[in-house]
Amino acid sequence: MTRALAFLYGVFCYLLFLVTFLYAIGFVGGFGVPTSLDSPAAGPFGEALLVDALLLGLFAAQHSVMARPAFKRWWTRWVPAAVERSTYVLASSLALILLFWQWRPLGGTIWQVDNAVGAALLWALCALGWLIVLSGTFLINHFDLVGLRQVWLNLRQRPCPPVGFTSRGYYRFVRHPLMLGFIIAFWASPHMTLSHLLFALASTLYIVLALRFEEHDLAASLGEPYRDYQRHVRMLLPLPRRP
């Protein structure tokens, strides 16, 4: 793959990620998309539950396996290192697009907040969650996270050193603010259907479990500075710093 082609590939993967991210907001919030988490039930309950569980499991497997260092070392035997991250972003976007396309709403209502002030507060909290996710990527290195930094430096024939460890902004209070933002966005809803509950529960469980593996990889990669960070800053809950 030429450097120019790798760059164009990286830009395409990034643009697809942006579209998928925006669609995800509508899918979770229940607006601007043909089928959302809170759409009316369609089809037999058992079939819908099985399909949704498989879709969630597929995304979780893709997202976790491709993020592991051992897989990356194996994968880059065939995929150029400069586009490894872009390929990961592409695969994640495609897994989410499949989930959005094939999701089977389950119907049912767990809670419904009809009070205008209460509903507005929940929508504001949901928006805050998405804002934390997006802004949090820029506190580390947004363009490295989505693969653009790698293909840009490759295009300019410059080395691509690893991004250094940082604990600024939200990272002073929790080690994984992006994941906290997702959890807030998934749960803060004035209309919680059975589908929404399944999605929120499964996503939260996946986040908690997946972070255990990511924490291990980060500690192995960054060494004592990250272990010290672990000792003083909570993983997800913004509680007071440990002494």
Image (tube, rainbow, N blue to C red):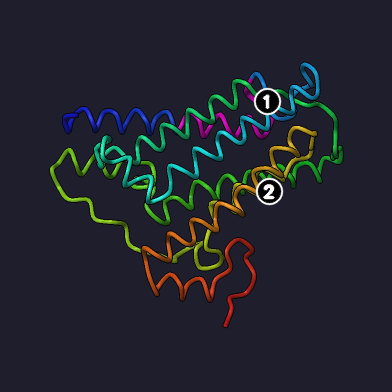
Q: Amino acid at mark 1?
A: Val
Horizontal side of residue 71 vs 178, given as left or right: left
For the magenta stretch, what is the residue range?
18-33
The furthest residue to the bottom: 243
Q: Nearer the viewer, residue 71 or 95?
A: 71
Q: Which residue is mark 1?
A: 51
Q: Which quadrant, please, contains the C terminus?
A: bottom right
Q: Amino acid at mark 2?
A: Leu
What residue lies at 42% left-to-right and 49% top-to-bottom? 68
Q: Which quadrant, please, contains the N terminus?
A: top left
Whole-percent x, y for residue 213 in the image:
51, 56
Tell me: residue 135, above or below residue 114.
below
Whole-percent x, y for residue 94 in the image:
48, 27
Which numbered marker is on residue 125? 2
What residue lies at 51% left-to-right and 71% top-to-bottom? 230
Which callout, 1 or 2, points to the residue nearer the camera? 1
* Dominant secondary structure, magenta: helix
Which numbered marker is on residue 131? none
What residue lies at 53% left-to-right and 26% top-to-bottom? 97
